[in-house]
Amino acid sequence: MAQSTGVKKKITIRDIAQMANVSVATVSYVINGKEGVGAETRARIQSIIDQTGFTRNINSRRLIENRSYNICLLIRPSSSPFQDLFYYEVMQGLLETCQQAGYNLIFCHLERDESERFIMPRTVANRDCDGIAIFQDIDHQFLTELKETGVPVVLVDNHSIPHNTDCIRVDNRLLCLRATNYLISQGHKRIGFLGNANLPDFYNASFQGYFDALAAAKMPLNPAWILSEAKDEQKAFADMNHLLSASRLPTSFVCSNDHLAIGAMKAVKAYGMHIPADMSFIGIDDIVLSRYVEPALTTLKIDKVKLGSVAGNLLLKAIDSPGSKGEAHTLEMNEIVERQSIKRLS
């Protein structure tokens, strides 16, 4: 008698068809969610699929549907989910949405040539992906080149809103307006601003919210209290450290993101001052780190996982509807997470 090899035979779509006494095409209709199958037959086939643990061969699926079932996330150093906690959480939402739809999320680092132009990733050039996601603002010329490949693109946390391109973002003007108004409500009249002018569209929107809040409250804007070159936590530390030698300081700062707020807070503490007794801070994002710094940072919460999830659904919709017009979406978020970094002055 032959010995069993112990290897379990893989269930095929043909096996499912035989068990249900239907054609292979009928099973295929059920698997792909297509119409044309009666409710009773569909339920019988689905029951057999569930009981047998059948999973369709991905290679067959790729060939039949002419898809790779890969989503490419193009990564730059300024928005890497492996270095930036904000984009790490956005990536989680994107990854979960892709996985639920049967797609892989693959990562490609964007590199530049000698003239500082972005190089088209091989994965995109070879059409080894069905969709592309990009975090943060992107060069318009490179975006045009990407779209010419015919692969759908979604922009996440992009503030220039290119024409006919799927994008999802939050309103940074409103967020900074809300943050500044919150400081004003706590009695602060000398309010500084910390942002990153290296991302012009993001900076302009954030600064506009700060400016509009001060103008509405008829409060003066002091140019010496505007720190605009803080591209990361280290630069925020350096810029704040330089400002602290001034004879007259603001009582508080609006920071366009939590990373910059944390860098500035470190500088204030290193200088021998106390937070919030000597200076108050409010950030935007509510990254995980903001609750663990000392003191914990008051910030406006952005649902970063939702941002990624919406981006994933926009991309999947574009994949299923080739040639569709791009949609621009703005998520409304203004929840303040109150912690210990703000002193009430009145």
Image (tube, rainbow, N blue to C red):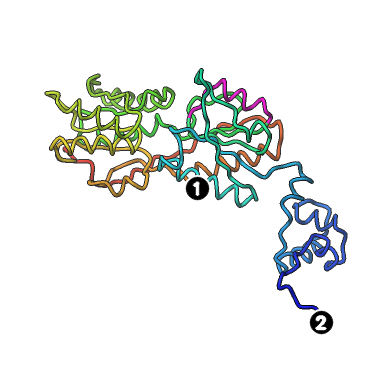
Q: Is label 1 in a helix, a strand or a loop? A: helix
- Is 346 situated left or right of 257 in this image? left
Membership of 143 in magenta stretch: yes
Q: Quadrant of residue 142?
A: top right
Residue at screen point 61% across, 41% down: 71
Q: How many marks?
A: 2
Q: Which residue is mark 1?
A: 92
Measure how far apart labels 1 and 2 are at the Cα level: 52 Å
Residue at screen point 79% across, 66% down: 44
Membership of 110 in magenta stretch: no
Which numbered disc, 1 or 2, marks the residue that appears first in the sequence? 2
Query: x%, y% of residue 129?
Result: 65, 39
Residue at screen point 50% across, 47% down: 92
Q: Quadrant of residue 285?
A: top left
Query: x%, y% of residue 211?
Result: 32, 23
Quadrant the C terminus occupies:
top left
Q: Residue furthest bottom?
A: 1
Circle 2 packing at 10 Å, graded few (<14), some (14-19), many (20+), is few
Give the magenta-colored segment's residue range.
137-150
Check residue 1 in the rendering and tell me which mark sits there, or answer none: 2
Mark 1 or mark 2, whichever is nearer to me? 2
Magenta portion: prevailing SS class? helix
